[in-house]
Amino acid sequence: MRIGLAQLNSRQNKSANLVAAGQAIDRLAAQGADLVLLPEMFNYHGLDAANAAAAEPIPGPSTDWARGKARQHGIFVHCGSLAEQRDGGVYNTSVVFDRAGAEVARYSKIHLWDALTPDGLEYRESDSFVAGGEVALFDCDGVTAGLAICYDVRFPQLFYALVDRGAQLFLLPAAFSVPTGISHWEPVLRTRAIENGCYMAACGQWGAYARGRQNYGHSMVVDPWGTVVAQCREGTDTIVVDLDMQYLWAVRERMPVQRHRRRDLFS
């Protein structure tokens, strides 16, 4: 299976963001991608309160657009994430469409980012968003993919739950800040891949987006041994990677951490 990542610089203009995302999808589809992954808040990216104010229902304009791109190219399209209006609240939600444009997975971010970064900026995602409460996976041409979003990557229990349900590939749209990205992005992505024997595809926003805040980018694919096999350059960029599932099974056989997990002692 060939996976494509579209590193974007989404801002507060939905029309412009969809044009940029569409161009990236078109380029990746032309390179033979079976699945395209977009970043967190792909359709509108500002401060959390502004993102929530721009929320849409699902189905809605942005997901209808993504469904159309999946049908147009006959590929899987993972919408990264967008602000979803649901049940009187707003959720940070990923949606995946298959080659025919049918929705095959939906996941709402479980762990909301409330943190103070070293540059003195405070983030309070929970002031504007409601946390999700369910894990999500889907089958992509025989590869089982598990969903997570950005800050979720710091919580290994979520990834244990996904691999226990059969995940072979983790799909992580993100919008990491620069200070956290420099210190934590690659180490934590590689760790989740290594400890679970899974591929990790992490697609981030890049560049300035609101009030001097910047995203780190460095979108990448990590193999089950923890090797970074491809990484986006600075700026908006795309990459494609062929996943080798025989290699995944070989790694799991050589390093059978899932068989060795003491589920009787640690939940």
Image (tube, grey):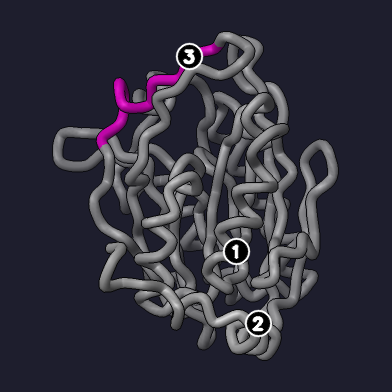
- Residue 267: image location, x then y, percent: 28, 63
How far apart are the two marked residues, 1 and 3, measured between alpha carbons? 29 Å
Q: Read off the magenta span.
A: 121-130
As helix, strand or loop, the secondary structure at mark 3 comes to strand
Tell me what residue is drawn at x 57 percent, y 71 percent: 198
Q: Amino acid at mark 2?
A: Val
Extreme-left residue of the structure: 87
Dot 1 or dot 2: first in sequence order is 1
Is label 1 in a helix, a strand or a loop? helix
Q: Where does the image place residue 10, in percent across and percent down from the top left?
A: 62, 33
* Residue at (56% x, 19% y) in the render: 117
For residue 122, which numbered disc appears in the image? 3
Residue at the spot x=27%, y=46% of the render?
Answer: 132
Q: Disc 1 marks which residue?
A: 193
In depth, the one of 251 and 124 nearer the eye is 251
Instruction: State the mark number for residue 251.
Output: 2
Q: Residue 139 versus residue 59: which sits nearer the camera?
A: 139
Q: Based on the displayed image, in which of its 4 quarters is residue 247 positioned? A: bottom right
